[in-house]
Image (cartoon, helix red, strand yellow):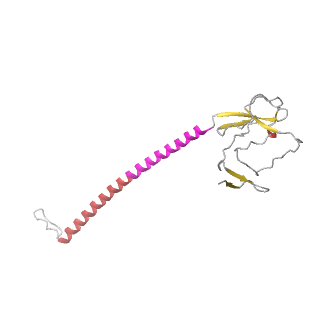
Amino acid sequence: MRFQDGSTTPREPTLAERRAREQAQRRQEAAARQAAEDEERGQKKRKRILVGAGVTVGVVALIAVGYAVARPTEEVQAQCVDEDSGEIVDDSNCVTPVADNGYRSGGGLYPIFIGGGGRQYHYNYGGSGTVGQRVSGGTTVVPSGGTRVTTSSGRDVSPRASSSGSDSVSRGGLGVSGGSSSSGS
């Protein structure tokens, strides 16, 4: 039967054909639902990523503002001064000041002159003058940790806050560079 004219009525589908059509229709509907759920999930994910990126940018901005605020606003000039004459000398004669009030030992060799056999030098903070002149004004007290201290040669000698706390003691000996610490109880 290769030819069917228009007057013939189509036959009813068999039970197997109806079931196959219904299954195909259900599969199509399930695929459409799945596609809609995937699209909704993708939108939620994009929204979360966008919110997360906004939060990250906000946190970074907050940290940047914190660093800008925490930056030392005050700057003091340090002059290396001969202790006996009060004359300003080259910065290489002075040793960087100790950062905290705790006891520090090790980490470097500092000569100790007994009986005044050598010259003593110290920093003068905030004084004025040039090398070879007597320093005028200023103090020998180390500025607070928030103050930036530079020498005339441009070296930064700002005090560093102690990271181990005020009641900890760092001890060292020969060949030890202050690696161990203990705190009083």
Tell me what residue is drawn at x 47 percent, y 46 percent: 55
Task: Determine whether 90 is above or below 21 in the image.
Answer: above
Task: Determine whether 53 is above or below 127 in the image.
Answer: below
Tell me what residue is drawn at x 81 percent, y 47 percent: 110
Depth order, front residue of 53/169: 169
Side of 71 relative to 118 (left or right): left
Side of 131 relative to 160 (left or right): right
Q: Quadrant of the N terminus?
A: bottom left
Depth order, front residue of 60/122: 122
The image quarter in which residue 39 lies: bottom left
Report x, y in % for residue 119: 86, 39
Tell me what residue is drawn at x 24 percent, y 66 percent: 23
Tell me if residue 62 is in the magenta stretch.
Answer: yes
Report x, y in % for residue 143: 69, 37
Side of 5 relative to 166 (left or right): left
The image quarter in which residue 101 lies: top right
Q: Quadrant of the C terminus?
A: bottom right
Side of 11 relative to 158 (left or right): left
Tell me what residue is drawn at x 65 percent, y 33 percent: 74
Task: Determine whether 183 is above or below 155 in the image.
Answer: below
Q: Residue furthest left?
A: 7
Report x, y in % for residue 137: 75, 28
Q: Which residues are magenta?
A: 43-71
Depth order, front residue of 131/39: 131
Q: Main secondary structure of the magenta part?
A: helix
Tell me if residue 76 is in the magenta stretch.
Answer: no
Q: How many marks?
A: 0
